[in-house]
Image (tube, rainbow, N blue to C red):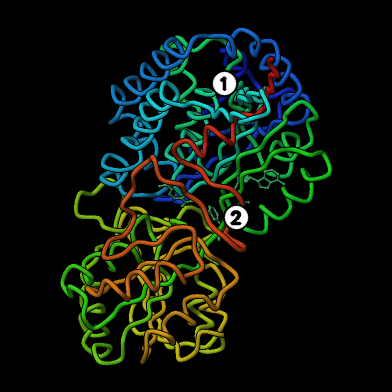
Amino acid sequence: MNIKNYINGDYKNPASNDWLDNYEPASGEVYGQIPNSNAQDIEEATAFAKAAFPQWSGTTLDERSRILMNIASGIEARLEELALAESRDNGKPVSLAMAVDIPRAASNFRFFANAITQFSAESHESVGMNAMNFTLRKPIGVVGCISPWNLPLYLFTWKIAPAIAAGNCVIAKPSEVTPITAYLLGEICTEAGLPPGVLNIVHGLGHTTGQAILEHKDIKAISFTGGTKTGAHLAKTCAPMFKKLSLELGGKNPNLIFADCNYEDMLATTVRSSFANQGQICLCGSRIFVERSIYDRFKSDFISKVKELVVGHPSQESTNLGALVSKSHLEKVEDYIHNAQTYGGTVLCGGKRVTVAGYENGYYLEPTVIEVNSNDCKLNQEEIFGPVVTIMPFDTEEEALALANETKYGLSATVWTQQLDRTMHLSNALEAGIIWVNTWMNRDLRTPFGGVKASGVGREGGFEALRFFTEAKNVCIKYN
Ligand SMILES: NC(=O)C1=CN([C@@H]2O[C@H](COP(=O)(O)OP(=O)(O)OC[C@H]3O[C@@H](n4cnc5c(N)ncnc54)[C@H](O)[C@@H]3O)[C@@H](O)[C@H]2O)C=CC1
Ligand SMILES: O=C(O)/C=C/C=C(\O)C(=O)O
């Protein structure tokens, strides 16, 4: 499938006529070409976005909400087509794209269609000073949304929906590794009645297309999800230009399992939090710490369950894990496994490539469990972002807390316990933006979403996203 940029409501070739191969992870074969856009394409898209801004920012909230609802319905109407496209582009099971990725993309639009009608600003009466302040929340203008390959349409729309709901015009770049559903979104937006120029979808590599977005002087804010190293580069580029930044970056999330937990519930969820989407979710619990009294039982039960997981072609209903997203990513993940001993661990199960009949060049890898005896090792400190978890015992709650916090990351943490005091103590003390207790990836779109430390800056979700995509302006009125 060959795709084009979506600029001012039209599909266009890149100015340079430079194209990139797009790979199907399940077969390892090239199945299409995508534009590698440059600064000229970004300039053109931004000019159209700027031209569309006065009208879009003045469009009533009811009308914006109606169009966003139409987009949500348009996504739902093409659920199967989008799920198949997402699976083909990314390697994830079709069943996962049908149940999670595409429904969530529709929910993102529906949620912000509603949220914008409920969003309000504050007023502050300066009592005794005969002055009244009120805050205006103005759309920023043209904003950039840059998203990764692991949850392609899910995360692309998680940024675009609040940006346009708040009255901005958008230059959006999906990952060059998984561009297809973003391409299809253009058609859906046109059919939904989104005016030309409000959303412009530009494809290409990070250091060409993405970099041109960062450097464009008229793009005033950037919402980014991706790797921590890229996030640091964005911050370095954008800070001197005083751009507003939201960075949702990597994680090395701890999973703290106490002996008093609901064991069966914990076991089933821990398998999912380890290997969902081939472990390629920034929220996956990749460091599993287990109270010593249940460590051996957990180790044996967990390994048995992991061995039951089926690695297979994404289109098969029986498949639990599909293909990893790319050859280079597969090799990166494998490096941690092949060097497990040197990096401080022992492989307990998995670790090998899987050959799927008829798709011998696909990027399939067994779900892998590695035992470590220290949290300092490379396996426990670096984001692997694949179907690999480590396990390690702990003795006390204080030790578990220290292990959890001993990392440069701080995205999410999961705690398994029935004790209320422990729940409260750990929820307060864990250094993470998201704490799950006796659950994982339980999402309410109103909640603040994001991390601390090297996991990012700012929060997405709910009114936090609408605050990010607006500038606060205070008006102070003196009266007699
Ligand atoms: N959701 C997450 O937390 C994600 C984390 N990662 C982590 O990052 C590692 C590297 O993966 P990559 O695919 O290289 O992720 P990346 O962070 O480079 O890619 C994310 C997005 O940023 C864009 N980008 C890259 N360089 C850019 C630049 N100079 N200016 C503007 N945009 C730029 C990419 O084109 C893509 O759209 C992974 O192995 C994983 O550890 C990757 C993807 C998602
Ligand atoms: O549920 C969400 O809003 C986000 C989920 C996952 C990511 O952000 C990620 O993997 O990057």
Residue 328, can we see it? no
Q: How packed is label 2: few (under 14 Cα within 10 Å), some, or many (20 or more)? A: many
Q: Is residue 165 above or below residue 34?
A: above
Q: Position of residue 472 (x, y in %)?
A: 64, 30
Q: Residue at x 22, y 72 (%)?
A: 267
Q: Position of residue 74 (x, y in %)?
A: 34, 20
Residue 329, can we see it? yes
Q: Secondary structure at mark 2?
A: strand
Instruction: Report the residue marked by disc 2.
Output: 456
* Residue 74, label in figure: none
Q: Is residue 403 above or below residue 12?
A: below
Q: Residue at x 38, y 59 (%)?
A: 278
Name the residue nearer the viewer: 374 or 201. 374
Instruction: Report the residue marked by disc 1.
Output: 199
Q: Secondary structure at mark 1?
A: strand
Occupied quadrant, residue 368: bottom left
Q: Is residue 76 above or below residue 377?
A: above
Q: Residue at x 36, y 78 (%)?
A: 369
Q: Position of residue 67 (x, y in %)?
A: 42, 14
Q: Residue at x 77, y 43 (%)?
A: 238
